[in-house]
Amino acid sequence: MPDAARDRSDSSTRGRVALPDPARSPWWALGRRLLLAVAILVGTVLLVYFDRTGYVDNNDPTGRVDLIDSIYYTTVTLSTTGYGDIAPLAPHARLINAFVITPLRIAFLVLLIGTTLEVLASQGREMLRVARWRKKMGHHVVVVGYGTKGRSAVETLINNGQDRESIVIVDPGAHALAEAHADGLAVVTGDATRREVLRRAGVADADQVIITTDRDDSNVLATLTVRQLNPDVWIVASVREQENAPLMKQSGANSVITSSDAVGRLLGLSSLSPTLGSVMEDLLTYGEGLEVAERDLLLGEVGKQPQSLPDQVIAVVRDEKVYRYFEPTVTQLARGDRLVVVRPARELPWAPRPGTHNEDLAEDD
């Protein structure tokens, strides 16, 4: 393992342990409130003990109250049992009971009973919510890794009509999971190379899996595991180095994106031709300027040449194969073809060209 990759892995593990989860566990809240209840108990014992001359013990011939009597009186008083064998006798002791110990008794009961009910209700709601989510889960998208690439992929999916509830994030990092929760996404914590983690993410019922971690070896292993769990799922994976792309495809990925190679080409184009680099960056930036989109062929476009259409056609998809617009195979467009076009970013990428949204599609018979 390269040193840089090892450092990133160790940093991710340390971050997960060191960074506190802002959403505190119900058990943490229960423990904190139990400590407050103990503090109330101890404080009341000391209050009664220091004012023991104002109390009388009816079971003691001398009537004196010692430390054990103070503990006993405090516990039965705060728990509202009240046997009456020890009682405040002096006027000031009765006033302290009325205005100090009684509010402490109420606070003590609220801390214990209220927190217990809160924990039980919170756990019940969470279990019910997870059960409902799992029941509706299916035909969803699983995104492995919520770094820069994963967030960009999710943003593109959502901007193109994908429902947030149908996206599941798998990531072991605390920071990434906090960001995914803030974005309203379901999250499964764990290593995506482990079969059980992918099962909890519902990979077996997913339509697509996007793998975007920063390590090629992890991506390959995750791809193999996903393909074993779901032989029919469409897998899109990223690799850092071009030499690992064939291995990724052999592992079962349907589409492989080389991140470092793509960035290097963009840098080279920008160096040779700044204007060409700007155009390529425009095409890769979502929601601005120009975008590459795929749409169905319209009925009125059947039999025409790709170059004659109002949209700027750059490729034709026929029988799940991609042809360049100038290849002889696609000289005439046929029913069932799909077009890859360059169009303004303000248009819906998957809709027909502007002004023709109500036209019939040229689907297969």
Image: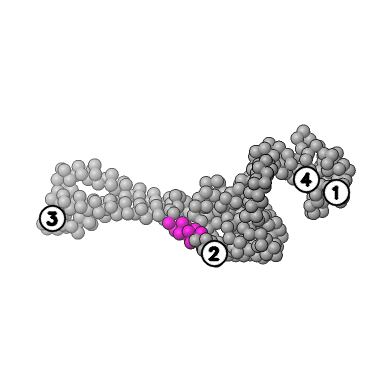
**Horizontal and vertical percent for residue 50?**
16, 51
Q: Which residue is mark 4?
A: 314
Rendered view: 136 above or below 204? above
The boundaries of the magenta stretch are 8-18
Question: Would you place residue 75 above or below residue 196 in this image?
Answer: above
* Earlier-in-chain disc, 1 versus 2: 2
- Marks 3, 1: nearer the viewer: 1
Q: CA distance from mark 1 to mark 4?
A: 11 Å
Q: Element at badge 1?
A: helix
Q: What kind of residue is marked 4?
A: Ile
Q: In the image, is residue 16 part of the stretch drawn in magenta?
A: yes
- Residue nearest the observer in this picture, 54 or 292: 292
Disc nearest the viewer among 1 and 2: 2
- The dot on residue 2 is 2
Q: Is residue 165 visible?
A: no
Mark before the other along the chain sequence, 1 or 4: 4
**Residue that mark 3 sits on:** 64
Residue 167 vs residue 107, the one in the foreground: 167
- Callout 2 secondary element: loop
> How many angstroms separate mark 3 from mark 1 (CA)?
105 Å
Sequence-wise, which precedes: disc 2 or disc 3? 2
